[in-house]
Amino acid sequence: MGNGPLDIASARLLADELGERPREVFRHLVDAFLNTGEPVGSRTLSQRLPMSLSPASIRNVMADLENMGLLYAPHTSAGRAPTERGLRLFVDGLMEIGELAPGERTAIEARIANQNRGIEDVVTQATLMLSGLSRCAGLVVAPKLDSALKHVEFVGVAPGKALVVIVSEDGSVENRLLDIPAGLPASALVEASNYLNARLRGRTLDDARAEIAAALESERAELDALTKKIVAEGLATLAPSGGQSASDEKVLIVRGASHLLETVEAQADLERIRTLFDDIDRKSDLIRLMELAKDGAGVRIFIGSENRLFSLSGSSLVAAPYANAQGKIVGVIGVLGPTRLNYARIIPMVDYTAKVVSRLLA
């Protein structure tokens, strides 16, 4: 099967092909490594294994596993650590994933639900909670939300030009330039402003746009032809750039990245974490990677150089999708950390959190 990357099917097949002795040696070695982060030697394994094997026999098995590309010897250490290929074999073929304790489930639900149920509150709190429990970075990709509008005004600024001023309830202000018919009376701009304010105030643009456009189209709007044209062009100007609806845009929320510094034990670790922070800064790349978790049900695990983004930092991402009230997958939540993650604990944690977020949004 070679020494290249393993997909899930290949990992499970290889796990089945391993004999009982190498399978047990490998499983206990990876368990010990994930707990301590240190290479594991034959003497340590002889004390952990359920079967009676001498250190010499264990070293022979470890040599075979190293030849298969599943283990390697860091530096001059007598111990062995799993390669990324070995971690993939362990995660997909050998690891026993436990259930979260009832108390942990209750704590997750209480922490996330103790919000105002707005999507941004829910996912931000979920990210904070995952970061705290995992002692890694918590991430979420969420749809970019339209803030409710407070005020819209058309202001003439030059012949044939008007400024559309949009004030949102969150305090943000946007200005957009609009072409208007030459000689348009100021009263038409006032009337257009009043018309939109009456229908937009306290609502998001996405909520109200279709309704206003339909009213203009069906002649229900009590406006003269010029003012109607200003309102229609104003609505078009307020649309997101690039032809996207606001719901197609994504934002990345990262919480608890400082936890990653807790794993630093050597200069090499510090360089790896610096590289990982650079990965986080490349938000569009990280969003694209997390969005891959939307393709299937349940949790996706991305390990190290299996993907280009983590090829230098040697990091892992455990991610799961969440849905909105209509059951549509709208975002992804996860945990990012070193490849030495406690996968058996973090996988059910991420999975359950995504389900709770989906339930709350519904």
Image (spheres, rainbow, N blue to C red):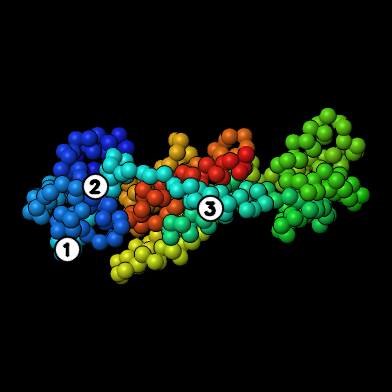
Q: Which residue is denoted by mark 3 in the rendering?
A: 107
> Marks 3 and 1: which is nearer the front?
3
x 49%, y 54%: residue: 130
x 49%, y 51%: residue: 103
x 8%, y 50%: residue: 57
Query: Observer-nearest residue: 103 or 173?
Result: 103
Please determine whether, in this image, residue 17 is positioned above or below residue 187: above
Residues packed near mark 1 inside 10 Å, few (<14), some (14 to 19) or many (20 plus)? few
Q: Earlier in the sequence, mark 3 or mark 1?
A: 1
Tell whether 79 sits left or right of 298: left
Asked whether disc 2 touches disc 1, contact meaning CB atoms under 8 Å apart, the reply is no
Q: Amino acid at mark 1?
A: Ser
Label 2 element class = helix
> Marks 2 and 3: which is nearer the front?
3
Q: Position of residue 189 (x, y in %)?
A: 86, 49
Label 1 element class = loop
Tell whether 105 sits left or right of 314: right
Tell whether 24 sits left or right of 131: left
Please determine whether, in this image, residue 263 is positioned above or below residue 149: below
Asked whether disc 3 touches disc 1, contact meaning CB atoms under 8 Å apart, the reply is no
Tell whether 63 sits left or right of 299: left
Residues packed near mark 3 inside 10 Å, few (<14), some (14 to 19) or many (20 plus)? few
Query: Observer-nearest residue: 66 or 284?
Result: 66
> In this view, which residue lies farthest toward the top?
218
Q: Quadrant of the C terminus?
A: top right
Answer whether residue 158 is visible to the viewer in this image. Answer: no
Q: Which residue is denoted by mark 2 in the rendering?
A: 27
Q: Quadrant of residue 258?
A: bottom left
Q: Which residue is denoted by mark 1 in the rendering?
A: 77
Q: Earlier in the sequence, mark 2 or mark 3?
A: 2
Query: Observer-nearest residue: 221 or 189?
Result: 221
Label 3 element class = helix
